[in-house]
Structure formats: structure tokens, C-alpha cells
Amino acid sequence: MSDLPSNRSSSSVPQPIRRDGAGGPDLGPRNIARDLQNPDMLVPPVTDAGLIPNLKFSFSDTHMQLNHGGWSREITVRDLPVATTLAGVNMSLTPGGVRELHWHQQAEWSFMLLGRARITAVDQYGRNFIADVGPGDLWYFPPGIPHSIQGLEEGCEFLLVFDDGHFSDLNTLSISDWFAHTPREVLSANFGVPESAFRHIPAEQVYIYQDEIPGPLSSQQITSPYGQVPLSFKYSLLAQQPLETPGGSVRIVDSSNFPISKTVAAALVEIKPGGMRELHWHPNNDEWQYYLTGQGRMTVFAGNGAARTFNYRAGDVGYVPFAFGHYIQNTGTDSLWFLEMFKSDRFQDVSLNQWMALTPRELISSNLHVDSELIDKLRKQKWPVVKYPGYSYPPR
Ligand code: MN
Ligand code: MN
């Protein structure tokens, strides 16, 4: 215990003390690295109050599933209990590494973070889909549709989002698992080949394995007699012209421009240094966030005097329960990039500023006792999703 007081003297060690003197030094056991990352949790704004559950979990605090061929880690209700609508998986595949042929009860929405992969799928009518995806591309596999993912020359890393917080990528329906748990004579009868054909099948689920890098897409295309899937499973989000605002940019993708994506809507948001995503809420569902670069803070307002502030940075997941008010402020010196996702067919939000601007000024004035200068300013404002003042994303 003799090293405890080492926290005491260094000026770089933050202390839970407000400017007005409230609080006091923390001289006991503490994780200073975490405190440095969470200044608004160590010293919360005085406006924070009440009981709001945890709305943050970092992929850095998850179990890493390491396989030859890649790795994965996930954030589900087991890690972040409030997040019941969506679950997220962060996965990397080596060059040639394969996420094996599988399917699941949940829809799969994905964002390619870096590198490239080849994805394959076949739908219930025998229509197939084989495509290569790169940075900023999305894919969406409807529930129950079998698929695979394989890293190309440079390998890849991506975020997967599933429309059920109870999902686990370690508990899907895998082709190797099914083979391993089907009587050999049934496999023989099903495929019309001798049982000996199955003497080398894997004994259990493979999940991720190392394979050779596949040849060019043209060499692997298969023409189905039933054609290709009518709605593409792929969408190039970064190719979309963003809505530019003084404080950043936003790209929105939902079933209006990516028709197959019927259960997941998303926005890719950039907030420049000094900027913030304005006070708003969503009238359709909870929000699941994934932070790509930079750092920021969010306060979530739950009504009845309850509000809680969290700090986020690249690799963290944030969550906002349905209709709760919030903002996201860039607290760093680089652009903050994040994805906001909803279990919904459409992206929807309600801007506090827009609501107030379109409400009789007498009501605003008598309700809030704000001076007319604020109301004048609201009337002149446009209402983009991001406001105020390093494009560092994508990485290549
Ligand atoms: Mn999958
Ligand atoms: Mn939001």
C-alpha cells in the first residue's frame, strides 16, 4: 500500500474536485488511465442527476475470440444490459481468413472499417449475391439468409450490427456445426455420396479459419438459374454525398436508399473540433452508437430530473434509450466520427431547435423565460443534423 500516495502530487493526475471545491482528492486505489479518459464521469457536470443505467461499453473491455484467420469481439446485453435492440460485433479477418458459411435468426448490418472482403449469400428463391466490399461499404443480410465473409489481399476489419441485443456471433447456425451433428448416413443419403466423403469434416463449429486468398471476383462468380438477389445486399455509404454543415457532415442510410435494410437505419456522422451534434432525440427507437475516431461526450436526459454524462472515444459503444434527449460534443482536437444506428426501417430524429423555432414565440418565452434574442436566432436557423465548427476517417 506504500505506493498509494503517488497519486497525490502529480498535476497530470485528475482529481474528483469541481471548480467550486465540491468533492475531494482520490488518494486510494484508482485506475488513473481510465479517469483520464473519462473527465466528465470523474467530475460530472452539475446538471447530472438521478438514476440512469450505464450507457457505455468499450470493445477494449470485451472477450477476444482469437482464431487462425482472424478475431472477433462483441457487445451484447450480456455486456451492456440496456442495449436490447441491437448487438454489435467487431471482427477482423486476415488475408484469406474466412468467417464460415452460416446463418442466424437476426438481420446482419455491417460497415467495413478498413481493408476489403468478399461476401457471399443465397436467398430463399435460389438467387445469389457475391460481391467485394471495401472501406465505407455496408452490407445487409436479412434474417435466415446464409452467408460468408472472406478477407481479401489486405485483410479487413468491420463492424457487424444485429437487430437483437441478445444475439451472439458465437451462437449462430454454422454449416460445419450442422454437418458435425448430422448422422453420417443422413449426410450420405442427402448428397448421394458414400459416408467416406465425410471422414474429414470438422468435429465442431469452425467459426473463423485461415484459407488461401481467393482469386478475382470474376473467377468466383456463379450464375444462378434464378438470377441475383433483386435488392442489393451492398451499399457504398462513403460514396454518398454527405449533408455538409459548418460543424461536420452526415450520411444517412436506411430502407429509403438501401431498400434491403428494412430493420436497421444508420447515420455516419462527422463532428469537427469545437462542434457538436445538436440537442435532439429519436421518435422511433433506441440509438446504438459506435465511435470510429476522436473523442466526445454525451449527456442523456431521461426526464424526471435524470441526466448522465459519458465520455466516448474510438472503439467505444454508446446507447440512448428510446426518445431520451441527448447531444454529442467533440471534446478533442481531431474530428469525431461515429455511427448512430437504430432498429428501424427509417432514420428519424427531432431537433430541439427546430421544434422551438416552429412554436409560437410567446409560448417559448413564457415557458422558459428566455429572452427574445434566442428566439430571433432560432427563426433564422437552418436545421442540419450537425452544427458549429481533421477529416481523419476513413484511414485509407
Ligand atoms: Mn452472420
Ligand atoms: Mn441521436
Image: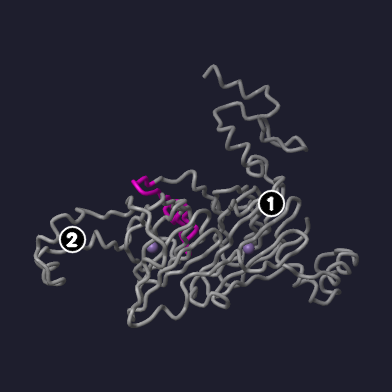
Percent coordinates x, y for residue 26 in the rendering:
62, 30
Residue interval drawn in magenta: 65-89
Between 182 and 37, the one lying in front of the other is 182
Crowd rating for badge 1 (residues with CA inside 10 Å; few <14, some 14–19, many 20+): many
* Label 1 residue near ligand 2, CB within 8 Å: no
Percent coordinates x, y for residue 311 in the rendering:
63, 47
Mark closest to the chain's N terminus, 2 or 1: 2
Question: Is residue 366 visible in this depiction of the protein?
Answer: no
Look at the picture and state if 356 lies above or below 172: below
Is 100 colored magenta in this rendering?
no
Crowd rating for badge 2 (residues with CA inside 10 Å; few <14, some 14–19, many 20+): few
Corner quadrant of residue 10: top right
Secondary element at image label 2: loop
Q: Is residue 162 left or right of residue 123?
A: right
Percent coordinates x, y for residue 208 in the rendering:
34, 53
Look at the picture and state if 278 lies above or below 38: below
Q: Amino acid at mark 2?
A: His
Corner quadrant of residue 243: bottom right
Secondary element at image label 1: loop
| Residue at the spot of label 2 | 181
> Does the residue at mark 2 contact the one at mark 1 (Cβ under 8 Å)?
no
Location of ligand 1 given as a quarter of the image:
bottom left
> Which residue corresponds to the image point at 44% horizontal and 53% vertical from the top-left?
153
| Residue at the spot of label 1 | 335
Q: Amino acid at mark 1?
A: Ser
Between 23 and 70, the one lying in front of the other is 70
Q: How many marks?
A: 2
Is 85 colored magenta in this rendering?
yes
> Which residue corresponds to the image point at 66% horizontal and 64% vertical from the top-left?
250
